[in-house]
Amino acid sequence: MKQRNSGILGRICSGMVIAFVLFVSLYPIIWVFLSSFKEVPGGLGLPDKWVFDGYVTIFTKLNVGRYFMNSIMIATASTVISVIIVAMSAYVSARIDFKAKGIVTAMFASTLFIPSISISFPIYRLLGQLHMKDSRAGLIFIYSGLGIAVTFFIIRSYFLTIPKEMEEAARMDGCGYASTFFRIIVPIAKPGLATAGIMVFLNNWNEFYFASLLLKTKEKMTIPALLGQFTTAYSKNLNGMFSAIIVAVVPTIIVFCLLSETFVKSLTAGAVKG
Amino acid sequence: MKQHKKFLTRKNGFICAFLAPGILLFFIIYAYPLINIFVTSFCKWNYKNFQAPEFLGWSHMFDNYIKIFTSDANFKMALINTMKWVVLTLVIQVPFTLIVALILSKKPRGWKITRNVFIIPNIISTAAIGLIFLNIYNPSRGIVTEIMNQIRPGSNISILANEKYAFWGVTFAFIFFGGSLCILLLTQIFSIDQSLFEAAKVDGANAWHIDTKIVLPLMRPMIGTVAVMAVNYALLLYNEIALITGGGPDNATFSLSYYIYRTALGSTKLNFARGNTAGVIQFILGIVLVGLINKAFRTNEAD
C-alpha cells in the first residue's frame, strides 16, 4: 500500500516536472509566434485581429532570402572545410604510428580549453590585416577552426572502429596512403563524418559573436547577425522583429523535427567519446 | 632496404601532407591568438599606439593585471557576475537537467516528445533566444510586465531597467535550457546494464533507491562532463547579454566575455591590452574550473 502511494506521488511529481520542461522550452517561441500576428505585438492572449504586416515587411522590404543564402553558404562551406581538414588529421592520429602522434592529439584536445571570445581580438586584428574583416570568406575561415576539438574526437573515434584489414587489403592492391583514405576510409566513415558535420553545421549556422563582430555590410549578413541588428535599428518595428524571429527559427525547428534522431545522435557523440 | 627507405619517405610525406592543414588552422585560429593575448597583456596597448604594443618593462610588467583587479569597476562587476552565473549553473541547471533525465529515463508517456522539445531552445540560434527574451521583458507589452500588472495592477515593472532584476533576466534566458545536456545524461542512463535494475528490483528496491544507489553513482563521470559543459557556457556568456541588456543598466550585467568585447573592440576606449588581460584571466579561470570539477567528479578515473 505504502509502495503504491509513493508511486502515485512520484508520478505526479514527474508529471509536474515534464509539464514545467514543456512550458519553459515552448512558451517563449509560442508567445512570439502569437504576438507576431498582433497589431501591437506583445501582451497576453490571442491576437484580436490577425495581421500579417510583419511577415510582408520581412519578405518584401528586408529581402530575407538573401540572409538565408548567406547563412547556408557560410555554414556549408565552413562545415565542409572543417570536416575535411579535421578528418585528415584525425585519420593520421588514429591510424598511423609516428613520433609526434601524442603531440598532435594533445594539440587538438587543447583547443577545447581556449575560449573563442578571449582570443577574439587578435583574430579580429589578423583578419583586418588580411582585409577579410567584413567578408564572408573571413567568417568561413574562422568557422572552419571553431570547435575542432569535438569534431576531431568524434571522427577519430569513428576511424578507430574501422577494422585495420580494410586498409591492409587496399595496400596489398597497391593503393597509396592518400587514395586508401579517400577511396576506402571516407566512404566507410560516412556516418561518423555526417554526425560531426551536423554538429559543426548547427554551431556555425547559429554563431552570433563573430558574425556580428565582423559583418558590417547588410548584404553579407547571416541570419543571427541580422537578428542582432534588430536590437538597435529596428526596435521601432516590433511586427518586423517578431516576424523575423519566427522566420529565423522555424526552418531549424522543422529540420530538427524531421531528423530528430540524427540530431540527438550528433549532439551526444562528442561528449560520450571525448 | 632501399625499398624500405622509399616506403618510409612516402609515409612521412603522407603524414605531413595530411596534418599540415589541421596544424595550420590550429596555429592561426588558436595558438597565435593565445600567445598574442598573453604577450600583450604585459604591454601598453590602446588606440594611441594601435600599430605597435609596447612592453611595460620588467618592473611594471604586471601593471595591467594590477589595474584590472584594483581600479576597474566594470571588470570587477563582470568577474562577480560571471562567477555568480557559474555557480547558478551548478546549483540550478545541472541538478534540474539531471532530474529531468532521471524522469525521462523511466520512459513515461510522451518522454521522447519532451526530450525533443527540451532540445529546441538549444538548437535555435541564441541570437533569436536573446531577442525573444528582450521582448518578453519589454516594459510596454512584454509578458512579464503584463503578468505582474494582473497580480499588482499599475506596478509596471521593468526588468531590464532595474540593476538587480536585469541579472535575473539574463539568467532565466539560459538557465533552464539544458536539453542537449539532458540527452547526454539520458544516453548514459540507457547504457547502464539492465540486469542491475532487475537484480535490485528482486531485492525489493524501489525507483528512488535504484536512482540514488545505482544510477547516480554510475553516472558520476557523465555528470562531471555535463557540469564542465554547463560551467563553460556560463563562463563564456555573451550573446544573451549583448542582445538583452547590452551590459546595462549601468553596467550591472557585464560578463567577462562582454567586458572583453567592450574593452577591446566595442567602445571608444579601445584598450586592447586590458581586453587581452581579461582574456588571459578568462582562459586561466576556465582551466581552473574544469580542473576543479573533474577532481570533484573524478572523471579522470574513467580514462
Image (cartoon, helix red, strand yellow):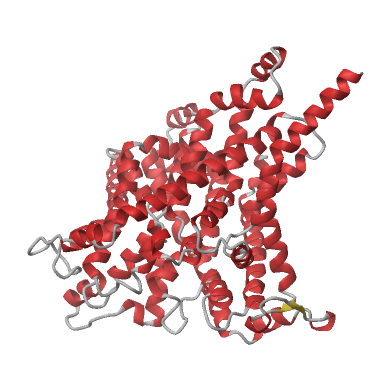
- Outermost residue to the left: A49
Along the viewing direction, whichever of A266 and A116 lies nearer the viewer: A116
Residue B240 placement (x, y as % from top left):
42, 66
Question: Which quadrant is home to the N terminus of chain A?
Answer: top left
Tell me if I can see residue B173 in this picture: no
Quadrant hosting residue B34: bottom right
Q: Residue at x 65, y 69 (%)?
A: B281
Residue B303 placement (x, y as % from top left):
68, 40
Left or right, residue B58 beside residue A112: right
Residue B225 placement (x, y as % from top left):
56, 48
Quadrant hosting residue B75: bottom right
Left or right, residue A48 beside residue B71: left
Left or right, residue B260 beside residue B151: right
Residue B214 placement (x, y as % from top left):
51, 39
Q: Residue at x 71, y 48 (%)?
A: A107
How many numbered circles does the render carry? 0
Along the viewing direction, whichever of A71 and B118 lies nearer the viewer: A71
Q: Residue at x 21, y 62 (%)?
A: A57
- Outermost residue to the bottom: B71
Tell me if I can see residue A134 in this picture: yes
Left or right, residue A228 beside residue B14: left
Eyeballing the image, is B267 above or below B144? below
Question: Which quadrant is home to the C terminus of chain A?
Answer: top right
Eyeballing the image, is A214 above or below B27? below
Q: Residue at x 42, y 54 (%)?
A: B96
Along the viewing direction, whichever of B265 and A268 lies nearer the viewer: B265
- Outermost residue to the right: B1
